[in-house]
Image (tube, coloured by chain):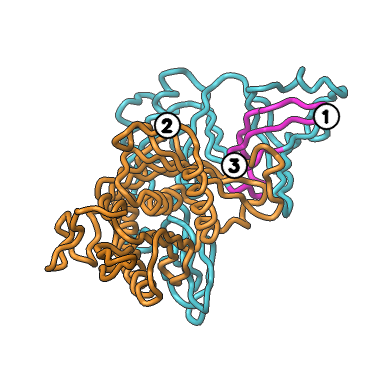
Amino acid sequence: MESDIKLIDDDGKRLDGRMADELRKIKIEAGVLHRAEGSCYLEWGGNKVVVAVYGPREALPKHTQDPLKAVIKAKYNMAAFSVDDRKRPGPDRRSREISKVISEALAKVILTERFPRASIDINIEVLEAEAGTRCAGLTAAGVALADAGIPMKDIPVSCAAGKIGSKQEGDKKTGGHVVLDLGKQEDNFGDADMPIAISPRTGEILLLQMDGHLTLEEFDKALDLAITGCNIVSKIQKDALVKKYQSNVEVD
Amino acid sequence: MSQDKREIVIPSQLLGDIKSNKAGRGTFIENGKIYSETLGILNKSSDFINVVPLKGRYNAVEGDFVIGIVLEAMASSWLVNINAPYPALLHVNEVPWDVEFGETGKYLNYGDSIMAKILQVDAEKKLQITLKDRNLYKIRGGYITYIEPSKVPRLIGKKGSMISLLKKYTRCRIFVGQNGRIWIDGDNNNISKVLRAIRKIEEESLTYGLTNKIEELLKKDTKDVQ
């Protein structure tokens, strides 16, 4: 896509004033809903996401049950008012894909063999979207699962990296910068977006998708950058959980 | 509980290694290190490291007494919700009545509450409960409330100190199921008194000297003590 927007200036500053390796502002709050077993509210730049966790409970309909382990059913949904134009409500191709990859990422860290025949339902509701909602959703889901007291090996965390600011020269694109955590303009007019999710304790990759083109060197650079970003976000997740529950443990 | 401080741990938090400690409940081992698997309170006793979960569903254990709510009356059994991940099965052989085939609905039906004992938990986590034990019956009257199953030991107290305190000051009959459901019967005034105390216990379950605090709370508005 060609445009006259300059996504990154000569000093390396981006549209919203961030440097190449800077994240947007992140705020996480655990345990915001009373009816859900676990929940989380997350703001990531202009993204606003609420996640509710239900279960483990008996998986229904019965043919979805697995006699050896729990099934993880994440459901990603964007609210009709989450974007500038009205988003047609209901599941579509995109949200079904995101639900699937998030379910698979979460199933890797949850101790699913503890709950045979059960399902753990995770509802990810995007209230406001501004690029990177799957990362925001997965990150919030990690906190909500921990908040629900579900046994897991790690709190999964997600973050994106990408490439912006290349120039069209003939039929080739040249230049460009690998940057962390793309914003809306950068996502729409940039060259590549690569969301990843990791298990921060082991460094295992739980999710890796890529949209656009990167060379092998750029890919390696973007992956390293995204993992660094994940580790920063992981710290915020853990602080949010400790903050919520530490207040109950006052010693007198 | 002789620690000075209760520490909150979160999943994946490093707690120690297997050379100097033993991994207890709520932990898992990877590469010789012990990690927490759930959000909970760290509890080190002798050389065991345990994590007592803060939240989560009731984990059914054989022999536990629970309060269940009937979900369905089937031809020769009932399905009962005991707040575990799965509904529990109550077979007609496990009730004190002589039930004819297909007439289960006459004895227990949808919405009825029962006190029951966990009879069996198998590898597939199929649950069976029974009514054939002391003081197990269908609940008539009273009030049922709920707390987190992990807070049940706190409500009962050491050797039942907390629960006998509640009974002493309010003259209510109270039955605490291990699954977090609590049945209270008495006059309305006293029931609300018990409920207030239970909410306080739930809120401050992690503080010390709670039994004394609750005693003060109950003393304040009680004149006659049984």
Q: Are marks 1 and 2 in contact (CB under 8 Å)?
A: no
Q: Determine if the magenta segment contains residue B77.
A: yes
Inspect this view and state whether residue A27 appears.
no
**Mark 3 or mark 2: which comes first in sequence?**
3
Q: Determine if the magenta segment contains residue B95.
A: no
> According to the image, label 1 marks what residue?
B76
Which numbered dot is residue A57? 3
What span is colored magenta in the figure? B59-88
The chain that hosts pointer 2 is A
Q: In the rendered view, would you say B100 is above or below A223? A: above
What residue type is disc 3 on?
Arg
Q: Using the image as rendered, state which of residue A186 and residue A241 is in the foreground.
A: A186
The chain that hosts pointer 1 is B
Q: Residues within 10 Å of mark 3 (few under 14, many from 20)?
A: many
Indicate the chain coloured cyan by its letter: B
Along the horizontal axis of the image, is B71 left or right of A150? right
- Number of the front mark, 1 or 3: 3
Along the horizontal axis of the image, is B86 left or right of B168? right
Secondary structure at badge 3 equals: strand
Disc 1 versus disc 3: distance between alpha carbons? 24 Å
- Number of the front mark, 1 or 2: 2
Which residue lies at the image location 59% right of the left edge and 48% below the top edge? B59
